[in-house]
Structures are given as structure tokens and as C-alpha cells.
Amino acid sequence: MRTATEGPTAPVGAGLPAAEERFRTLLEAAPDAMVIVDAAGTITLVNAQTEALFGYPRRELLGRPVELLVPARFRAHHVRHRDDYAANRQARPMGAGLDLHGRRRDGTEFPVEISLSPLETADGLVFSAAVRDVSDRRAAEAELTRLYEQQRHIALTLQRSLMGTPPAIPGLAAAHRYLPATQGAGVGGDWFDLVPLGAGRVGILVGDVMGRGLEAAAVMGQLRSAAHALAVTGLEPRALMQALETVVADLGAPEHLVTCCYLVMDPDSAEVVLCSAGHLPVLTVAPDGSVRPLPVPVSAPLGVGGVPHRQTTVPLPPDTLLALYTDGLIETPGCDIEERLDDLVGALGGAPDRRDLERLADHLLAALLPDAGGYDDVTLLLARTPAGPRRSASLVLPVLPQSAAEARAFVAKVLHDWDAAGLLDDTALLVSEIVTNAIRHGAGPVRLGLRLLATELAVEITDRSPRLPRPRSAEPDDESGRGLALVEILAQRWGVRPTESGKTTWFSLPFTPAPR
């Protein structure tokens, strides 16, 4: 190809062999800018699209280094890429994965895509570069990306508002993590919750609405609110799960099955009561570092219907670590979920520091989640069973009128023994009112229990009647009806929860230990 002296007005085919004339004709007809360079990187041929794209007349390009069309800051790198391609020539994109730019005659820059092909000619090996201006496409992509990020931010803000923030519970060490999905809008159906149930008891919820997107998040938000409200009433895990079954059916979203686990920790009895609807096993780490799943009968997910949910009670000594999570933590494409569960067990057992739950949560995420690639939204909740009460005492009372006086005397003796006589007046008054209600309206025997916790005195009165007390307004001349009103006024917190054999009315009063 004798092209270095040819001007832009020379006839395309003047004096050239027919094959080369056809090549030039094809070059001019190409929709992209076409630049032909020799092995030394010198421009030997261009088409009209190159003139239009870069703003150079053809005569100013021929015989010049191809780096003339590259921004100055990239020219050294371009020479290296060009040499690498010459050593391994094949039809392929140059700088695949790189952000490539061209430079016009006026100095302006623009993003380009370049494809390269080696050509054998009578004059030797040359390289054909097809250059395409992608400015419009990049603008459309932009960053579209901004719109996507805005929508993702809105969706994640919505999801976090639906999930809420679990409260800090005195005496309960806990840490939690939520990571949005790495694909799509990032929202999903994971949720978790910590529910103070009074008298030192704590409810822990974790659930996963199968599927992704705003619809799954909306279902999650409704279920979390319902589950929290049901837990606060003191429902046992099995009864709560049956109630949630009805909620799922009422939502009218049969495509969204839900896995859920609810457990109640009772530090006084050193037990945990739990029920699981198709959820992954809860893992425990004993103080000696041994890891095992809690033995619990797992029923079908919520939404299947017709499957009774069962609960179980498991001894759980103080300082036991609980790990609850959703499938996003251990479900990785191409990996068996049982193997991934073993990985989680190993990460828990081999963690360098299990006392700091925040560091432990970060350690587990780093160990279990892939460095890259797509995973579902992830929920991880760690909690350490609190220590039992500092002191506890109980008394069983018959259903007799004199039992209220016996209860007051018992409270007085116990609080004096515990150096908590400052709580005596309010405690004796409330115990007397609740025991009297249990004797009049409940069924015996009545059990009175007192627990002295780190920051409060917890009192429970249990009877055999399932009928729950209801506060009512008493008239000035009424002899009854003021008991629960007094509880409402004097107690720090109070509530009533059903039990398998009746109900328990509880209240708590703030306690500050006397300085020694």
C-alpha cells in the first residue's frame, strides 16, 4: 500500500490493483472510523469516518503515529498494549475491560470502543482498528446507573424502616447484621427482632419471606409488625406461629412462603422455648466453644397450611451464644447448603474472639460470604443468654382469702433479706392486688415468684385460669376494680401472658443496689 503521499481528494482507486481498490471501497463504506496502521504503529490508511470523528484531514494523519489519536496521558500505555497485541495478534478487542478514550484535533476527548484485526497485505502485516464513539451510550448508561442507585437507595430505606431497629435489652449482649442482596434493587424478605417480654424474659424472632423485590419486602414488613405485636402479648412460640399462619393466609400472597423461628429465653429457668416453621437451625456455642444446633422439630414454612407447629423446651445455661440467620448467609450458588452450614459451624467454633459479638459478626460475614458474585439478602443475629437473677424466691398459695396477707408477709421478708426494703411498699401493694384478683377470679393454686435482676425487681403471679384480667374504670363507691389501675401507675412495666396451664401476670420495678 503506497498511501503516505495520497491526499483526501485523490481518486480512491487511481492506479491501484483491483483487490486494493475493493478494499478501499469497503473501508469507506464502513460505519465506524477505520484506521490502518503498520507494525511500527504508523497510520497508513483511514476512511472518511475517521476524518469526521477525529477532526483531522486525511493528509494530517497518514504517516503519523497512531498515538496522535490517543490522549497524551494514555500514550505510553497505548504503545505497550499495541506491542502486546502485535506479539499475540488475533481478531479481538484491544484493552478489553479498559476505559478507552480518543482525542480529537481540537484536544477534546471522548469515550471509544476499539476492535482490532491483523491483515496480511502485499506490503506486509498491518492492523485494522475499528473505532466507535460511545459518548451517547455512556451518557445513557450514566452512571441509568444514577437512576438505579436512587431507586435502590429508596428501596433499602423502605426496607430498613419496615424492619425497624431492635431495642437494646438490659443484660442481653447482642449484635446483628443485615446486608441487602447484591442483585436487583437489593431488597428482600429477611427480618429479625428482639422483644423484651418482662421479668427478664426475651423473645427472639428471625424470618425470611421467600423471593426478592418490593413485594417480598412489603410482606416482610407486615409479618414483622404482626409477629412483634403477638410476641408482646406473651404468646408461646407455638401459638405465635399458628397466629402468623393466619396472617400469611390473609395477606393473599400464596407465592411467598415464609420461614420463621421464634424463641423465648428465660434466664430464671435457664431454658429456651422455641418453635420453627421451616427455618434453618439455630446454632449454639457453649462456653467451652462446642457448637451444636438446638434440637427443635421443624415444621413446614408459613403459607403451606394444614401443618401443626410444635414447640420444644431446651435447657440453655447462662453465657451460651445463640446464632440465628437466614439462608443468604450460607446459600451459595454451586455449593451444597449442608456443607455451607458446616462452614458456619466451623467459623463459629474457630472464631478468635467470641466475647466481642460485634467482632464475631464481622468475622462470620467475612468467612461465609463470597468476595464477589451475587447473594441473597443476609441476616445474622447473635445473642448471649443472660445470667440468671441475682436472687430469686417463690411461694405457692392456696385459693383462700388469707393468701393475700400471706403473700404480703412473704414479700416483706424476702425484700428485707435482699437489702431491697425500699421497694417494699409498692411491691406489697401490687402483689396484694394481683393475688386477690387471682383468688377471686382465677383458679388455684397461685404461685408467687420474685426475681432480683441487675436493674429491676421482677414479680410474677401465676394461676390456673386462662381468663386474662382486663383493666376497668372503677366508680368512687366501688370496692373493686382498682387493682390493675394501680399496677399501671406504679409499675415500671407490666403485662399478662398465657401459659399452657393458665396465665401469668407480671410487673417490674426499678432497682438500684445499695452501695457497699
Image: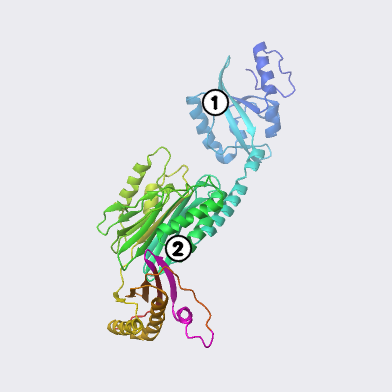
Q: Secondary structure at mark 2?
A: helix
The type of residue carrying mark 1 is Ala
Q: Which residue in the structure is indicated by mark 1?
A: 40
The type of residue carrying mark 2 is Ala
Q: Secondary structure at mark 1?
A: loop
Where's residue 381, x and y in %? 40, 57
The residue lying furthest to the left in this view is 288
Q: Give left or right: position of 260 versus 212.
A: left
Q: Give left or right: position of 21 versus 251.
A: right
Q: Which residue in the structure is indicated by mark 2?
A: 231
Q: Give left or right: position of 29 versus 257.
A: right
The residue lying furthest to the bottom in this view is 477
The reply to whether residue 343 is visible in this rendering is yes
Q: Which residues are magenta?
A: 475-502
Single out the mark in the foreground, 1 or 2. Answer: 2
Dot 1 or dot 2: first in sequence order is 1
Magenta span contains residue 479:
yes
Residue situated in front as seen by the camera: 463 or 73: 463
Q: Residue at x 67, y 11 (%)?
A: 18
Vertical placement of residue 389 versus 75, above or below: below
Q: Residue at x 36, y 65 (%)?
A: 501
Q: Residues within 10 Å of mark 1 (few under 14, many from 20)?
A: few
Where's residue 242, x and y in %? 45, 55
Alpha carbon distance from label 1 to label 2: 77 Å
Where's residue 142, x and y in %? 62, 45
Vertical placement of residue 258 versus 66, above or below: below
